[in-house]
Amino acid sequence: MTLTHYLALGAGLFAIGLFGALTRRNVIGILMSIELMFNAANINFVAFNRFLHPDRLLGQAVTIFNITIAAAEVVVGLALVLAIYRKLNTVYAEDYNLLKG
Amino acid sequence: MTWVAFYTFAVMTLGAAFCVVTFRNVLHSALMLGVSLLGVSGIFALLGADFVFASQILIYVGGINVLVLFVVLLAARHSDLVLRQSNAQWLAALLVCGVTLFGLLRGLKAYRSVTLAAGPEPGTAKIARLLLTDLAVPFELISLVLLAALVGAILFSRAEAE
């Protein structure tokens, strides 16, 4: 296995996530696609760490931070989605066109 | 042996991710997200990142995915199953993604000759030392971010008490 294999996997996952984030109508689907893109970045971090600097694990530490940020993002995002759903009774992104519901 | 495991996890990750973005039923998408995240954790295990592997399963599959499933169940309507789940711009999005993927894959050529030097060794103690010495400030900041996210989530999701 070379580094290219892992980076290609990360690139593919990122492209799929980007496609989902651009095309899903459901806000929860968009959030899930963003999680996929986070994971693609994490694969790249860990792969670079393993292949280029195996003695220092900075890439893995950054991945831990990334996972934490992703958790915080998804928690706040889903809380917002639920709050908006209670007001507008919809989860589709094109219906979210009012700042003051 | 490694490449069998790699391709298994890669197909699992990419196939499930494709299902996540294309399935009409969001509940099935959320379940497929769990499969995809498990595949990513397998890739982490292959790369010898033991602590990241464990946290991926604990936080992503056990935490985030369950949370997403809860919200899918709480904010679902019957009409979602018959409505179109992708917007009208899918062709443009496909073009954007194709160009992005092409550019990323072209950039990979420089790393074709990089191969592994030695086998993996356990890294949990190393990460712990790193988090408490060089990365101590980001480590404390991230706990502040988590606290803010916790307070924000409670603030947004509580029922109005008027």
Image (tube, rainbow, N blue to C red):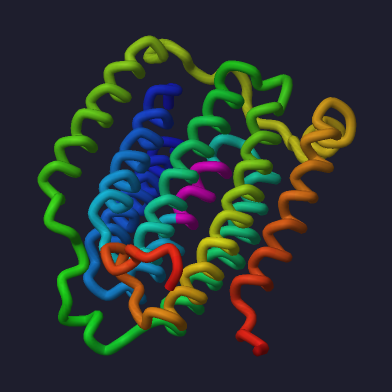
Q: Is residue B14 left or right of residue B38?
A: left
Q: Answer above or below: position of B134 versus B82.
A: above
Q: Is residue B43 magenta?
A: yes
Residue depicted at x 45% and y 23%: A3
Secondary structure mostly seen in the magenta stretch: helix
Considering depth in this image, is B91 or B102 the residue closer to the camera? B91
Nearest the eye: B121 or B142: B142
Q: What are the residue bounds of the magenta stretch?
A: B37-45
Query: Would you identify the image quadrant in which residue B140 lies?
Result: top right
Q: Residue A70's x, y, as percent?
A: 57, 51
The image quadrant where one finds the N terminus of chain B is: top left
Residue B63, percent from left and from top: 61, 66
Say left or right for B82 vs B70. left
Q: In the image, is residue B131 part of the stretch drawn in magenta?
A: no
Which quadrant does the C terminus of chain B fall into?
bottom right
Which is more toward the observer, B121 or A67?
A67
Point 41% across, 62% down: residue: B33
